[in-house]
Image (spheres, helix red, strand yellow):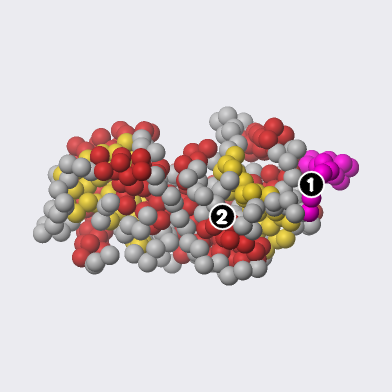
């Protein structure tokens, strides 16, 4: 065995050990007891929450709270909730609690009356969950402790990693609705059952798209059939920006928007494959590639710039709505499993997603296209047929792994098929 072979074997062994450790940690995470939640339960049992309602008539406007502290794509898929609440309770005051980075997705939404954003906790490897929970308690104390809400809704399906359930318990509205968390194990199940026993807990459904799950929970609350879909309201400034950055492109040009970044490395496709795939797009069409990136991804975008042999431009660090306006003018969006793919779907642009999740993988996984594919009839997802050992039900690698089975030829072929179809 050569030295290179020996190093390769060592790397493979280390990678397998990392994957085993990650799976064990995810399994153990379900047994973790939320002591801050237990403290809130103890305080509530001794001193129930009371809000002064003297002088408020029975005809006052309903106050509704929607907690959605997830990523951009999750919030986009939940925007239908706000329209449905306004349809059911026209005179209500709807307050949304979201992450600060997602503020632009709702600040132009006419169905949302007020938006609150808890400050992100300071990054630290020392007790990160405890720091996050304490920041949620502080946010509640500063902004919500003197407010009364008739209805509180926490529509996230699956494990809560952002303190949304804790905030729901702190608010303690007369009617509180949430999904059952089936990821909990051991004593955590009893703690959760005690904490939310007075709330409406919707059973965990069979694997389905997150938009359908949001539809189901709002139907449970309102009692009406939900007919809304995810939506985003762009402004004239957003359209002006997109017109400006795309003004130099000829009218008969096929605009291909590309996003190279994702929250986790395993969802990212190598830059060399992006460059090769874009060079294989239909030769009969005049292609212009628009590379969309954040400030933190600027170096990767510059590397792709050096590799690309087609006409292209870069949009770096633009706001979410301005990016959405630029994607709306594109013929197709191509990217990894990220929030921008949902942004493309909500502005009615064809979306092609390159996913690391195996086609025969776990349908309930956080990377499963069954749950998280762009909600559009003009979207497609490319997946590996099966995981690469030791991945089985999902890709758990730290770096790009199962996604490497997807070839530039395959992506270019499907992209060509989508471009040939009329919108």
Q: Is residue 279 left or right of residue 36?
A: left
Of the numbered discs 2 and 1, the one sitting upstream in the chain is 1
Can you see residue 47?
yes
Q: Which residues are magenta?
A: 39-58
Q: How many marks?
A: 2
On screen, residue 32 above or below 378:
above
At horizontal 16% and vertical 51% (from top left) the residue drawn is 251
Residue 384 drawn above or below residue 315: below
The answer to if 45 sits in the magenta stretch is: yes
Which residue is denoted by mark 1 in the rendering? 56
At 59% from the left edge and 54% from the top edge, which residue is drawn? Answer: 156
- Vertical relation: 221 (above or below) 286: below
Residue 28 screen position, x and y as percent:
64, 49
Residue at 73% across / 41% down in the picture? 147
Residue at the disc numbered 2 = 82
Q: Secondary structure at mark 2?
A: helix
Which residue is drawn at the image coordinates 39% and 44% (left, top)?
235
Q: Name the residue furthest left.
A: 284
Q: Residue 320 appears at what percent x and percent y?
A: 40, 42
**Camera sees residue 30:** no
Tell me how far mark 2 sits from mark 1, CA to CA. Answer: 25 Å
Outermost residue to the right: 46
**Residue 49 painted magenta:** yes
Q: Main secondary structure of the magenta part?
A: loop
Judged by depth in the image, the label closer to the viewer, 2 or 1, is 1
Tell me whether circle 2 and circle 1 mark residues in contact (CB < 8 Å). Answer: no
Q: Position of residue 408 (x, y in %)?
A: 24, 55
Label 1 residue SS? loop
Occupied quadrant, residue 311: top left
**Residue 277 location, x and y as percent?**
22, 53
Q: Is residue 241 left or right of residue 110?
A: left
Q: Nearer the viewer, residue 34 or 28?
A: 34
């Amino acid at each position: 065995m050569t030295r290179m072979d020996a190093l390769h074997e060592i790397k493979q062994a280390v990678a397998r050990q990392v994957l085993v450790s990650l799976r064990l940690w995810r399994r153990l995470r379900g047994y973790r007891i939320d002591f801050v939640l237990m403290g809130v339960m103890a305080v509530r049992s001794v001193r129930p929450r009371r809000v002064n309602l003297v002088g408020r008539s029975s005809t006052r406007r309903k106050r509704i709270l929607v907690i959605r502290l997830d990523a951009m794509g999750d919030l986009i898929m939940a925007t239908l909730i706000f329209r449905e609440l306004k349809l059911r309770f026209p005179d209500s005051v709807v307050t949304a609690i979201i992450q600060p980075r997602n503020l632009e997705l709702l600040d132009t939404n006419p169905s949302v009356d007020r938006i609150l954003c808890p400050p992100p906790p300071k990054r630290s490897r020392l007790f990160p969950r405890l720091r996050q929970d304490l920041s949620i308690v502080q946010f509640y104390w500063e902004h919500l402790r003197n407010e009364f809400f008739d209805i509180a809704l926490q529509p996230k399906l699956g494990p809560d990693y952002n303190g949304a359930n804790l905030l729901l318990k702190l608010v303690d509205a007369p009617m509180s609705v949430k999904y059952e968390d089936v990821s909990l194990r051991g004593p955590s199940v009893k703690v959760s059952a005690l904490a939310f026993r007075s709330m409406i807990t919707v059973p965990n459904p069979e694997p389905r798209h997150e938009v359908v799950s949001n539809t189901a929970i709002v139907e449970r609350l309102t009692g009406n059939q939900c007919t809304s879909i995810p939506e985003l309201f762009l402004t004239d400034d957003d359209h002006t920006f997109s017109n400006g950055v795309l003004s130099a492109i000829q009218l008969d040009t096929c605009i291909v928007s590309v996003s190279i970044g994702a929250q986790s490395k395993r969802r990212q496709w190598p830059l060399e494959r992006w460059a090769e795939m874009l060079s294989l797009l239909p030769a009969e069409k005049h292609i212009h590639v628009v590379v969309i990136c954040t400030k933190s991804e600027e170096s990767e975008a510059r590397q792709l710039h050096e590799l690309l042999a087609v006409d292209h431009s870069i949009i770096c660090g633009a706001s979410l709505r301005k990016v959405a306006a630029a994607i709306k003018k594109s013929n197709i969006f191509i990217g990894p499993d990220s929030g921008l793919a949902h942004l493309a779907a909500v502005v009615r642009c064809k979306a092609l997603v390159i996913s690391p999740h195996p086609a025969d993988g776990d349908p309930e996984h956080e990377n499963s296209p069954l749950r998280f594919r762009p909600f559009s009839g003009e979207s497609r997802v490319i997946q590996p047929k099966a995981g690469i050992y030791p991945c089985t039900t999902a890709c758990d690698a730290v770096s790009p792994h199962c996604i490497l089975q997807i070839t530039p030829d395959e992506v270019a072929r499907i992209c060509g098929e989508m471009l040939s179809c009329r919108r």
